[in-house]
């Protein structure tokens, strides 16, 4: 069992997406621990300050690695296009808009990164704000998409109860319901943080303490790791 878990971790770390999930979880985990230990102290020092510094470094590493994500996102957006014709029209529309927001997010973040690095002589703050707004838009669209899919799946389950559908079909539908609920929880946690990082004055922007940002990010990261693990197990089976 331990050997299997170790081999699974190694396999995840060897792949870019798997490594990013682990680094993301560590990033937010350090922020959660550092923020909780620091309490009201500003600026934090000692172990809390070190944990928050590690979190910032891990976040910077992820931002740098995302410089190479544009083509992968473009490939996915092109392959999805306007969505399968047999898919629900509202789901397709929300997916296309979400893909568009994700596609625009990357160049905006790259400009902000380049401005901070001194490569471009422009103000970075407006680009960070724009990239965060695009990320928040994508998360909100994703939540709406999952809610629409949940509505369809629950209607399908009610139909199963009144018909002689196979237990396997019902089991698969319930598994999809669980996956969409987890998607909503993960995106809602990320959306809460995204709003926090927008300019002050918009909803709860700027009001979260570091530990709460870390908690929401850790919850989202663990859900993502769990779902990726479940997908890997189902593909292996």
Image (spheres, helix red, strand yellow):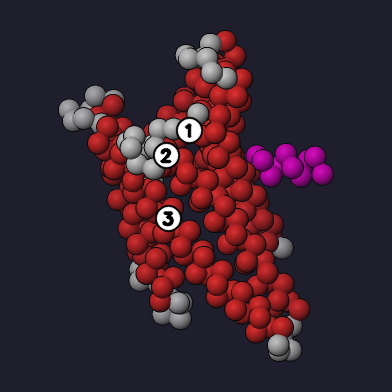
**Side of 2 where 181 appears, left or right:** left
Q: Residue at x 48, y 58 (%)?
A: 143
Q: Does label 1 or label 3 sit earlier along the sequence?
A: 3
Badge 3 element? helix
Q: Residue at x 26, y 38 (%)?
A: 127
Q: Main secondary structure of the magenta part?
A: helix
C-alpha separation, residue under disc 1 versus residue under disc 2: 8 Å
Q: Residue at x 55, y 75 (%)?
A: 152
Q: Quadrant of residue 63?
A: top left
- Within-10-Å neighbours for mark 1: few <14, some 14–19, many 20+: some
Q: Quadrant of residue 39?
A: top right
Give the residue furthest to the left.
121
C-alpha separation, residue under disc 2 versus residue under disc 3: 16 Å
Compared with 19, 173 (above or below) is below
**Side of 110 where 27 appears, left or right:** right
Q: Which mark is residue 220?
A: none
In this figure, which residue is indicated by the disc labeled 1? 208
Q: Position of residue 102 (x, y in %)?
A: 36, 52
Is 34 in the magenta? Answer: no
* Residue range (magenta): 1-10
Badge 1 element? loop
In this figure, which residue is indicated by the disc labeled 3? 140
Give the residue furthest to the right.
1
- Look at the image and tell me in which quarter the C terminus lies: bottom right
For the residues carrying marks 1 and 3, which lies nearer the camera in this image? 1
Q: Position of residue 206 (x, y in %)?
A: 40, 32
Number of marks in picture? 3
Task: Tell me if label 1 and label 3 are in contact, CB under 8 Å.
Answer: no
**Side of 28 where 204 appears, left or right:** left
In this figure, which residue is indicated by the disc labeled 2? 204
């Amino acid at each position: 069992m331990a050997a299997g878990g170790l081999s699974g971790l190694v396999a995840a770390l060897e792949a870019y997406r798997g490594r990013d999930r682990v680094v993301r979880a560590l990033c937010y985990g350090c922020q959660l621990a550092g923020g909780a230990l620091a309490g009201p102290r500003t600026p934090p020092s000692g172990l809390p300050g070190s944990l928050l510094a590690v979190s910032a470094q891990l976040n910077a590493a992820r931002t740098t690695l995302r410089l190479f994500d544009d083509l992968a996102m473009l490939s996915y957006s092109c392959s999805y296009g306007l969505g399968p014709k047999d898919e629900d029209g509202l789901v397709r529309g929300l997916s296309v808009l979400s893909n568009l927001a994700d596609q625009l997010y990357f160049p905006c973040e790259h400009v902000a990164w380049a401005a901070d690095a001194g490569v471009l002589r422009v103000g970075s703050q407006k680009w960070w704000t724009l990239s965060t707004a695009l990320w928040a838009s994508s998360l909100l669209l994703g939540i709406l998409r999952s809610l629409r899919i949940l509505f369809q799946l629950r209607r399908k389950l009610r139909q199963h109860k009144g018909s002689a559908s196979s237990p396997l079909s019902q089991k698969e539908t319930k598994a999809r319901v669980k996956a969409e609920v987890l998607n909503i929880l993960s995106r809602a946690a990320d959306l809460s943080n995204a709003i926090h990082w927008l300019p002050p004055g918009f909803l709860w922007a700027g009001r979260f303490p570091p530990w709460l940002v870390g908690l929401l990010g850790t919850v989202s990261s663990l859900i993502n790791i769990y779902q990726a693990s479940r997908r890997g197990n189902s593909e292996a089976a």
